[in-house]
């Protein structure tokens, strides 16, 4: 079922490279295979593959990309679906050589899934535990996502929910994600919720400057400051950002989660070689390669590492360091970081054989 296509030696290196995935939206990560199962469960929806993923060489507007999530959400609307999708996604990341995964997902309104938001999170946690009991070699944690389109009140509710789970899941729920259509709403309305989250010990990963002209919002949110930044595409001056934003990110040493294919297919960057990975990586700033939505953007983490390496001329040693340095950016505690570093050390001879 999770057959890997290994064309040549280079592919094998990236597949065997132990990896950390820190930016993966559950319903954006649903594979072709799982979509097939969902379509066969719901033939009456008349959904075809072309509506749930953006293939090789294709591009879409941001708006069109967000439409794709709506289609996936139609297919994933029961407890059974959520459980299947989450277990499949985790198994696929494990098969791709991901050793530590922070999955994120937005608990949807009860009328969309028949589940309360609490039950939604419990279902994802059940999937994580199920995968653990299967003995998969992957440590999975969860970030509860706030959809910025739903406003301040829902954001506060979500923070309270995340807080409850953080206290009751023994470290499985570590924090919050802020995502959703960046052209809708303003981050300032969400500040009280995000501040509360921070105060109670939830880690924050915020989608920031995903589109141009969010300078004021990014500045406000950077004052929190967040623990990690998703995308940060338009933070630096060359693309209309500002040096003071860059300075804040650097001063607080906030890692960036960078998703090459997502940004190229969503057309927020013009091509791989102009991706802002180059700007931040050259500065030696913590930069973590991630997938964002491996299903929707038809990619996987090995492929994203390979693309970064071929586009920016990274040696295998540099790629190794990139994946190893991601360990320092995880939200799990130091003991987990140490265990992962040991694992990387033990795997190195095999990967460079
Ligand atoms: C349009 C585009 C280029 C997408 C990539 N960048 C993104 N930006 C903001 N929010 C996102 C992005 N990708 C996924 N999401 C969020 O994740 C959700 C899907 O996963 P889930 O239902 O939370 O489990 C989407 O509805 C959206 O709220
Ligand atoms: Zn994202």
Image (cartoon, rainbow, N blue to C red):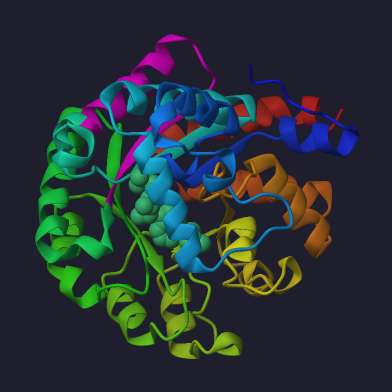
**Visible in this render: residue 25?**
no
Q: Quadrant of residue 207?
A: bottom left
The answer to whether 153 appears left or right of 191 in the picture is left
| 341 to 277, vertically: above or below | above
The quadrant the N terminus occupies is top right
Q: Is residue 123 in the magenta section?
A: yes
Percent x, y of residue 238: 61, 88
Query: What span is colored magenta in the figure?
Result: 120-145
Percent x, y of residue 329: 47, 51
Q: Residue furthest right?
A: 8
Q: Is residue 47 in the magenta section?
A: no
Residue in the foreground of this view, choosing between 218 and 76: 76
Percent x, y of residue 40: 48, 23
The answer to whether 65 appears left or right of 282 in the picture is left
Q: Quadrant of residue 74?
A: top left
Percent x, y of residue 19: 61, 38
Q: Residue at x 64, y 21 (%)?
A: 2
The answer to whether 97 appears left or right of 328 in the picture is right
Residue in the foreground of this view, choosing between 248 and 136: 136
| 135 to 181, vertically: above or below | above
**Visible in this render: residue 16?**
yes
Report the number of discs. 0
Residue in the foreground of this view, choosing between 143 and 78: 78
The picture quadrant for ligand 1 comes to: bottom left
The quadrant the C terminus occupies is top right
Q: Quadrant of residue 164?
A: top left
Q: Residue at x 84, y 61 (%)?
A: 313
Q: Residue at x 43, y 59 (%)?
A: 66
Q: Residue at x 70, y 26 (%)?
A: 347
The answer to whether 352 appears left or right of 347 in the picture is right
Residue in the foreground of this view, choosing between 47 and 247: 47
């Amino acid at each position: 079922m999770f057959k890997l296509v290994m064309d040549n030696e280079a592919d094998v290196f990236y597949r065997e490279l132990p990896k950390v995935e820190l930016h993966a939206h559950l319903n954006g990560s649903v594979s072709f295979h799982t979509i097939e199962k969902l379509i066969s469960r719901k033939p009456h929806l008349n959904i075809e593959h072309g509506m749930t993923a953006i293939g090789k060489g294709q591009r879409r507007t941001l708006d069109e990309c967000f439409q794709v999530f709506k289609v996936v959400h139609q297919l994933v609307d029961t407890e059974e679906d959520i459980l299947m999708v989450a277990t499949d996604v985790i198994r696929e990341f494990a098969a791709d050589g991901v050793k530590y995964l922070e999955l994120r997902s937005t608990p949807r309104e009860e009328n969309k899934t028949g589940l309360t938001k609490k039950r939604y999170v419990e279902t994802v946690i059940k999937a994580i535990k199920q995968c653990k009991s299967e003995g998969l070699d992957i440590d999975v944690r969860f970030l509860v996502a706030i959809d910025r389109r739903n406003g301040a009140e829902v954001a506060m509710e979500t923070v309270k929910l995340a807080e409850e789970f953080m206290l009751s899941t023994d470290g499985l729920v570590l924090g919050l994600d802020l995502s959703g259509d960046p052209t809708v709403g303003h981050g300032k309305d969400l500040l009280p919720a995000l501040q509360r989250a921070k105060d109670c010990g939830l880690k924050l990963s915020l989608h920031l400057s995903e589109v141009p002209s969010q300078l004021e919002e990014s500045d406000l949110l950077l004052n929190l400051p967040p623990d990690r930044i998703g995308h940060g595409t338009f933070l630096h001056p060359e693309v209309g950002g500002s040096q003071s934003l860059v300075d804040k990110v650097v001063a607080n040493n906030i890692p960036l989660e960078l998703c090459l294919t997502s940004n190229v297919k969503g057309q927020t960057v013009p091509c791989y070689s102009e991706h802002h990975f180059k700007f931040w990586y050259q500065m030696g700033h913590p930069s973590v390669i991630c997938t964002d939505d491996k299903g929707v953007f038809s990619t996987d983490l090995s492929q994203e590492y390979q693309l970064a390496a071929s586009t920016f001329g990274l040696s295998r040693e540099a790629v190794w360091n990139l994946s190893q340095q991601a360990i320092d950016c995880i939200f799990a505690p130091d003991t987990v970081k140490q265990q992962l570093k040991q694992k990387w050390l033990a795997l190195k001879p095999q990967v460079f054989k």
